[in-house]
Image (cartoon, rainbow, N blue to C red):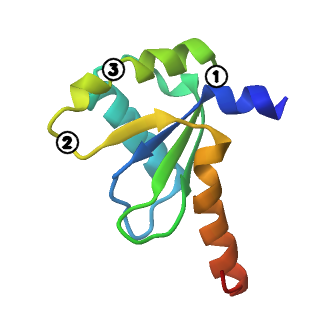
């Protein structure tokens, strides 16, 4: 089941994070990026989950989970609209997240890498 769950995720890079950003702030920011910058019409109920991952230095990436694979494809086919911005979108594969998860774990438990 986890194998299929990762197929409906994307990663959004280079988004600044507010000091006290809540889940709803991240969700609203993600919706704005999808609607305004990517010009993809996706309503909030089509987004299953939104999480910030990684170190807080320079803005953490956003992991976005959709309710269907087709919605993810719709977003992945629109990055040409991001030309001229620093924002980058990639597929949310677990192999790409391992370095970010390791950084969080080592910092949390003060484990030297």
Q: Position of residue 61 (x, y in %)?
A: 46, 53
Task: Give the farthest residue toward the front.
Answer: 113
Q: Quadrant of residue 53?
A: bottom right
Residue located 37% across and 16% down the image: 41
Q: Which element carries disc 1, helix, strand or loop?
A: loop
Q: Is residue 81 left or right of residue 109?
A: left
Residue on which disc 3 sits: 78
Residue located 66% across and 26% down the image: 7
Residue located 65% across and 55% down the image: 98
Query: Label 2, label 3: how many angstroms apart (C-alpha)?
Result: 14 Å
Query: Label 3, label 1: how many angstroms apart (C-alpha)?
Result: 18 Å
Q: Which element carries disc 3, helix, strand or loop?
A: loop
Q: Is residue 82 positioned above or below 15 on the image?
A: above
Q: Nearer the viewer, residue 65 or 105?
A: 105
Query: Label 2, label 1: how many angstroms apart (C-alpha)?
Result: 27 Å
Residue on which disc 1 sits: 67
Q: Is residue 65 positioned above or below 23 on the image?
A: above
Badge 2 local density, few (<14 within 10 Å), some, or many (20+)?
Answer: few
């Amino acid at each position: 089941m986890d194998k299929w769950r990762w197929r409906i995720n994307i990663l959004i890079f280079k988004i600044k994070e507010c000091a006290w950003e809540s889940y709803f702030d991240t969700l609203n920011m993600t919706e704005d990026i999808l609607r305004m910058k990517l010009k993809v019409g996706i309503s909030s109920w089509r987004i299953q989950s939104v999480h910030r991952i990684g170190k807080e230095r320079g803005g953490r990436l956003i992991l976005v989970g959709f309710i269907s694979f087709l919605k993810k494809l719709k977003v992945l086919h629109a990055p040409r609209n991001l030309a001229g911005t620093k924002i980058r979108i990639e597929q949310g594969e677990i192999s790409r997240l391992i370095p970010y998860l390791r950084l969080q774990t080592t910092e949390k438990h003060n484990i030297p890498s």
